[in-house]
């Protein structure tokens, strides 16, 4: 098992990519603390995954709650080997139609929340620990209407570069994973029923070179790699797990159909 004896903290670990990663980490021998805002889903995940999982209700925008979550993790499992700062939110923020409250809410969760997650964990990170941040293809995609989300995900990449330098003397690695369109609850607001989701899936899949949306488990496997000793010399990197959107945009189905 690739994470045997290691302790991980996953924010936003009660759904989507965070949940898939928690399942995989436990299967690979890790003790895992997950955070989220919904106590019911947190408790359900803890029940599903067993004694090696600690569920802590904590809002990623509340530094005091993050400190308490880290303290509870350390009290239960000891120091931290892995921090997966994954909690995030998305919303459409077109220029001319966006409130300050909405814009700041996205940055508050996706940037400030991640900073204070890592700050809360920093003193408890063991030598050789791994810090992983969830960014997005939106950091480079230039998708209209997503200014706040794109800005927040780009900021994470910038912070990761700084932290990679700060933590390097301690042997602590810092990396970023940037998913493309993935089947998670983040789409619920845009596609609230099966018919709407099928239409969304079809539309998004036509813009992805591999022709389909990603699964949370596919992102989780990349996070596992970065968390494990298999990535012991990987530091300060941003790995895109996006079906080719970033690296092969000319291969998307829409363009193939027009040739």
Image: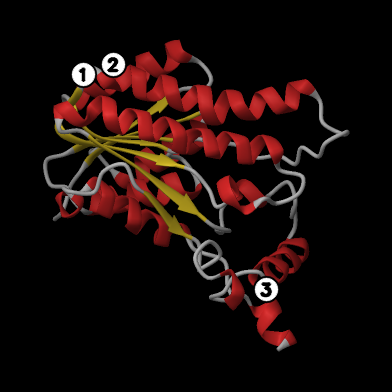
Q: Do the residues labelled 2 and 1 touch (CB within 8 Å)?
A: yes
Whichever of callouts 3 and 1 sits on the residue coming sooner in the sequence is 1
Estimate the spatial distance between the alpha carbons at disc 2 and disc 3, rounded to whole Å.
45 Å
Instruction: Name the residue beneath numbered marker 1.
Output: 75
Residue that carries the numbered disc 2 in the rendered image: 71
CA distance separating discs 2 and 1: 6 Å
One can see residue 258 in this view? yes
Q: Where is residue 65 in the image (x, y as percent from the top left)?
A: 44, 15
Q: In this view, does 33 lie to the left or right of 213?
A: left
Which label belongs to residue 140?
none
Whether 194 is drawn above or below 39: the answer is below
Q: Position of residue 246 (x, y in %)?
A: 53, 61
Between 184 and 133, the residue placed more toward the observer is: 133
Q: Circle 2 — which element? A: helix
Name the one closer to the observer, 27 or 41: 27
Circle 3 Cα neighbour tier, 10 Å, few/some/many (<14 / 14–19 / ≥20)? some
- Work out how far the residue at label 3 is from the one at label 1, CA to CA, in angstroms: 48 Å
Which residue is pictured at 34% across the width and 46% down the height?
A: 22
| Quadrant assignment, res 68 | top left
Task: Please state which of the two labelled residues, at mark 3 or mark 1, is closer to the viewer.
Answer: 3
In the image, taking residue 180 as reference, residue 86 lies left or right, namely: left
**Image quadrant of residue 117?**
top left
| 89 lies left or right of 126 | right
Q: Is residue 196 above or below residue 69?
A: below
Point 69% across, 79% down: residue:
255
Name the image quarter holding the N terminus: bottom left
* Residue 110 pos. (x, y %): 54, 31
Say which mark, if any, is on residue 206: 3
Residue 125 to residue 198: above or below:
above
Q: Nearer the viewer, residue 161 or 17?
A: 161
Quadrant that contains the C terminus: bottom right
| Residue positioned most to the top | 64
């Amino acid at each position: 098992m690739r994470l045997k004896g290691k302790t991980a903290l996953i924010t936003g670990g009660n759904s989507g990519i965070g949940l898939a990663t928690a399942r995989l980490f436990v299967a690979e021998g890790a003790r895992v603390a997950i955070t989220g805002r919904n106590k019911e889903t947190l408790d359900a995940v803890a029940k599903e995954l067993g004694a090696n999982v600690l569920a802590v209700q904590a809002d990623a925008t509340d530094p005091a709650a993050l400190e308490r979550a880290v303290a509870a993790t350390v009290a239960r499992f000891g120091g931290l080997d892995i921090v997966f700062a994954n909690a995030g939110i998305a919303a459409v923020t077109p220029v001319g139609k966006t409130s300050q409250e909405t814009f700041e809410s996205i940055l508050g969760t996706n940037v400030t929340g991640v900073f204070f997650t890592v700050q809360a964990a920093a003193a408890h990170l063991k030598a050789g620990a791994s810090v992983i941040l969830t960014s997005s293809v939106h950091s480079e995609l230039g998708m209209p209407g997503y200014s706040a989300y794109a800005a927040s995900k780009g900021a994470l990449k910038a912070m990761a570069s700084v932290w990679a330098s700060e933590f390097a003397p301690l042997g602590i690695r810092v990396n970023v994973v940037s998913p493309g369109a993935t089947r998670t609850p983040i789409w619920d607001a845009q596609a609230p029923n099966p018919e709407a989701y099928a239409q969304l899936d079809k539309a998004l899949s036509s813009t992805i070179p591999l022709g389909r949306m990603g699964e949370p488990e596919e992102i989780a496997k990349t996070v596992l790699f970065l968390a494990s000793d298999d990535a012991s010399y990987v530091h300060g990197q941003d790995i895109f797990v996006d079906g080719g959107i970033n690296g092969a945009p000319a291969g998307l189905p829409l363009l193939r159909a027009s040739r």
